[in-house]
Image (cartoon, rainbow, N blue to C red):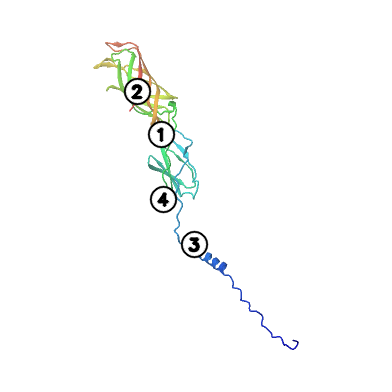
Amino acid sequence: MSGITPIAQAPPTVAPHRRRRWVLVTLAVVMVLGLAAGLVVWAAPWVPPPVLRPAGLVAGPATANSVSFRWSRPPTGPLPDKYLILNGGTVAGSVPGTATSYRQAGLTPATRYQYRVAAVRGGKRSPQSASLAVSTLTPPVSQARLQATWTVNVKYIQRVFGRASETQSWEINPVCAAGPCDTVLWATVGYLNSFSVKLTRMGAVYRGQTVVNYTQCGTAGNAIPDPTTLTIRVRVATAAGQGQAWAATTLTGTMTGTSQYISAATFYCPASYFKANLSGTSA
């Protein structure tokens, strides 16, 4: 046995391990899909956010000739380029998109107005807001301007001549350019007589006095001047907005006349006094 030479044997062959590549393949697929998705997003058209409808309109301070109101900013998205202000369906003005209020002047006193607001961005207009009603203030009657042409009914309650009543035409011209102030009254009595008198204002009341030939002493062909001291006191009863003015529309008052004794060669007229109630409406 000792003489047997051992035979060398090669080590057993071991099959090599196969590397797993599924992780790399999956990663590559994910990257490709992600890139493709990115390309799809990049290629999609950009859609601008909608132009939102203005909301939250609330009335603000007002005067006899102006109103104001405000609204809320858009809850999301960019601001509009501007806001359009619509009054009765017509564009009355505009403000920048950074503004949230509007004031309109030059309006008629004691008048109601309806407003809506629309936003504009990039040439696109939003739906109009809900309607908001606002009104200019109503001034007191004492602030009314006494002006224009009037039809005045004169009813004599104490008289010395035949007529019991008559209608006079008055043209009243204020001495100021705007607002209430003193006036000059031009009156036509029938088709024969006319007179003028300055009326001084004290609140809603106007007073004036003048000397005129209001009545006739004698007959039409044989009359002498009969100076009468005429005193007029009127009060503005109602008023309304006319353009930007707060103008008187009706008035009430009294008119009195005092005449002295006068005589001619063949006749005379005794001293006299009359009183009349006045009620008038502007044309």
Q: Quadrant of residue 15?
A: bottom right
Sequence-first disc among 3 and 4? 3
Query: Disc 1, disc 4: CB below 8 Å?
Result: no
Mark 2 neighbour density, 10 Å: few (under 14) some (14–19) many (20 or more): many
Mark on residue 124? 4
Query: Disc 2, disc 1: CB below 8 Å?
Result: no
- Give the residue pinned by disc 2: 280
Rendered location of residue 6, percent (x, y): 71, 85
State how far apart marks 3 and 2 are (Cα): 85 Å
Sequence-first disc among 1 and 4? 1
The foreground one among 9 and 253 is 9
Mark 3 neighbour density, 10 Å: few (under 14) some (14–19) many (20 or more): few
Give the residue type at disc 4: Lys
Q: Is residue 205 above or below residue 130?
A: above
Give the residue type at disc 3: Ala
In front: label 1 or label 3: 3
Give the residue type at disc 1: Arg
Residue at disc 2, secondary structure: strand
- Residue in view at x 30 percent, y 11 percent: 268
State how far apart marks 1 and 3 are (Cα): 58 Å
Q: Is residue 46 left or right of residue 194?
A: right
- Give the residue pinned by disc 3: 37
Rendered location of residue 228, percent (x, y): 35, 17
- Give the residue pinned by disc 1: 112
